[in-house]
Image (tube, rainbow, N blue to C red):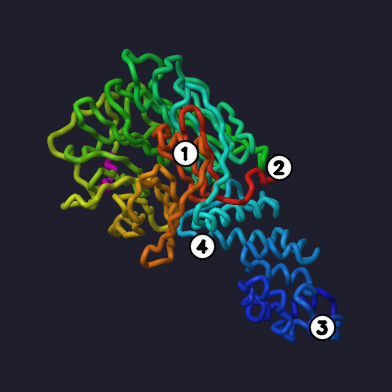
Amino acid sequence: MTYTDGLNAVETDLPSSLLRYGNWRFDQLLNADHWIPASLINAWPWKAKTRLRFSALPSEVLAEILKHVHWRDLLMMRQVCKQLNDVSRTRAVWTSQYQSYLAEKEFRLAAEEPMDHYSAAELESWVSQRRSADQEWGITKHLVRERTTSLNDDWYALTLVPGGRWLLATLRDGSVLCYDLEDPEMRSIVLTPPRDENNELIYSVTVDIDRSSPTLRFFMVTYLMDYLPQPLTGSLDLMIWCVNLRGHGSSARLEAHFLHSFPATEPSNTVISISLRGDLLARLMYTPGFRFYIEVFDWRLSTESVHRRTVIFPRQTEVPNSIRLLPGRRLAFVSLHNLFVYDIGIMVDDRPIAPVIPSSPSEHHWALSDSNGSYHFQLCQSNLDTEAVTLVLISKQMIYQLVIPHNVDHIPHLVHHAEVPRPCYMYTAGREKVLGENFKSILFKVGVANDSESGAITRCELVVSSTLQRLLCARCAFQPILTEDIGRIIIKADTTIFVLDTSRYRVGQISS
């Protein structure tokens, strides 16, 4: 019997008699001689007369077992012998670990490139960084790894691309810088050129990930958020870019291509929130008369002379917070006490001027109304899966998940996710991770168990540098940004960006 014949002979035995032990701890596996089935031993007659140990199994069988071993035990097994070290580094093992991790998550998560573009070492880095962040998020008095980079005075707004590697910084001249946070030196490149020379304008950027692309690709809109003095000069257009990932590993970079622009900025109005999804661009506008409205554009068909748009007029008694475009041509509007879902009506060609706000509000498709004032909503994150969009909302000490099905005939429902003990202020929340601050200006992280019916949580302090702690106490820091999948926190304080990595897996281990 050949070696290959022997392996084929026991294929049917592997899932039931071997792989069911795949979740055993490391010490149990090393002393597992007694559970190796006779069919496996007899398949290799040249081994039948010797006492078979776990490490003496053929590499193919070891690989099948290691695919199901806990990721930390998998790293520990490398210290046992050369064979286990070699097998634990194979691509088949880490492909399985990658797929298992994705299957555990309730929200969509994926690497920046197709899986077959990654080596075994790169898959190990991807999985270990995220597994480590999940585990470390629940450790008490967690000392995070802290890195900094300096900014000049022209900087204003930060946006973190989903995935946590690319940080976009918008300057006052309208240009956008891109920082690679996996680079130990966090070097930046100019992603888009300057728009004008008026350094008193305040620009920002919003991104929309293209889920149909196998490699990281997103659309980006740069827009005027606010202004300081009048009169305004320079370009006030909404500018849409397509950004693609080029290269691989440590040599990867983002490259932007201009797609379209059209003037849609009224000098007297302020943008509160903006959302981009496919060909639709929505923005929540606030007027000097303390009134607001929502414009939804087909940005590909809007020009200098004609806007293809529809306008939504929420109740003017609301305190507006943010908007989010949803699948099925719908839009979620979040106010302080209520949440509304609107159908996006038929778009028409309109003059490029601010709309006249009518006396009666637009009709909504669905509403979450707060009659007794118990809600104080803040929209933190949205997660898309195959059946629904989940909006993560903060209200006082409570964390909610609003599940909005893609099927418009199904009614959205609000789920109480967790309650954070007082006293604290929550900055942002995801499906599993929450970041906040207590009354002593000490950052804390909260881990929420998704599989817990009671919303079990673990609350732990973040130990940061004395420099950052001093800036937090002096209220010199902007609201932190959290990327949930790798537990990375971005804080801008004065002219410094602080990058806090809660994962103990070293940054910069992605191979070129």
Query: Is residue 175 found left or right of 54 in the rendered image?
Result: left
Q: Which mark is residue 104?
A: 4
Residue 138 at x, y percent in the picture: 49, 57
Calculate the distance from the C-alpha at mark 1 to the C-alpha at mark 4: 35 Å
Does 206 appear in magenta? no
Q: Which marked residue is nearer to the observer: mark 3 or mark 2?
A: 3
Circle 2: residue type: Ser
Mark 3 residue element: loop
Residue at coordinates 58% horizontally, 32% vertically from top-left? 255
Image: 229 above or below 494: above
Q: What residue is drawn where x is 68% and y is 81%?
A: 13
Circle 2 or circle 1, nearest the eye: 1
| Image quarter hosting the C terminus | top right
Residue 236 in picture, x, y percent from top left = 38, 21
Q: Marks 1/3: CA distance?
A: 60 Å
Residue named by callout 2: 512
Q: Earlier in the sequence, mark 3 or mark 4?
A: 3
Residue where numbered disc 3 is placed: 51
Q: Amino acid type of disc 4?
A: Glu
Question: Where is residue 120, by image quadrant?
Answer: bottom right
Q: Which residues are magenta?
A: 340-346
Q: Considering only order in the chain, which callout, 2 or 3, is on the residue closer to the N terminus?
A: 3
Using a 10 Å C-alpha cutoff, classify the residue at mark 4 as few (fewer than 14 neighbours), some (14 to 19) or many (20 or more). Answer: few
Label 2: which secondary element? loop
